[in-house]
Amino acid sequence: MQAFTMKRLALTLGLICLSASATGDEAPAAYKTAWGPHGVHVIENHVLPAEPGQRNLRARIAYPDAEGPFPLVVYSHG
């Protein structure tokens, strides 16, 4: 009897999940992307020297064409 109840519960939950995902409605966009008010300057392949025996840090620096100061975002992977 308990096995039948568990199968019935699993089938019911599966059908609920399937029907909820089959609505086809797309979620609204959180925001619309647009170009900002400033141009962008880019410094490609900037090298920050490291201590002897260590690897130098290569960087790409992008900053707005406007008066500063600007916040700094550092993205590093690997």
Image: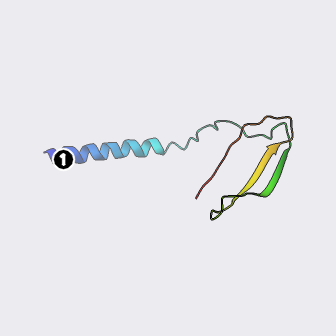
State the scheme by which the image is colored: rainbow
Question: For residue 44, what is the image quadrant?
Answer: bottom right
Question: For residue 54, what is the image quadrant?
Answer: bottom right
Residue 4 in picture, x, y percent from top left: 18, 47
Residue at x-position 37% and y-position 45%: 15
Looking at numbered disc 1 in the image, what kind of residue is underneath it? Phe
Residue 64 in picture, x, y percent from top left: 82, 41
Mark 1, Cα crowd under 10 Å, few <14 / some 14-19 / many 20+, is: few
Q: Quadrant of the C terminus?
A: bottom right
Residue 18 in picture, x, y percent from top left: 42, 46
Give the residue at the far bottom of this rendering: 53
Question: For residue 37, what is the image quadrant?
Answer: top right
Residue 60 in picture, x, y percent from top left: 75, 54
Instruction: Describe residue 56's horizontal placement relative to residue 13 as left or right.
Output: right
Q: Quadrant of the N terminus?
A: top left
Residue at x-position 58% and y-position 41%: 26
Query: What number of labels is visible?
Result: 1
Residue that numbered label 1 is attached to: 4
- Is residue 31 positioned above or below 49 on the image? above
At numbered mark 1, what does the secondary structure look like: helix, strand or loop? helix
Which residue is nearer to you in this view: 70 or 51? 51
Residue at x-position 78% and y-position 48%: 62
Instruction: Describe residue 52's horizontal placement relative to residue 24 as left or right.
Output: right
Give the residue at the far left of this rendering: 1
Residue at x-position 33% and y-position 43%: 13
Which residue is nearer to you in this view: 13 or 44? 44
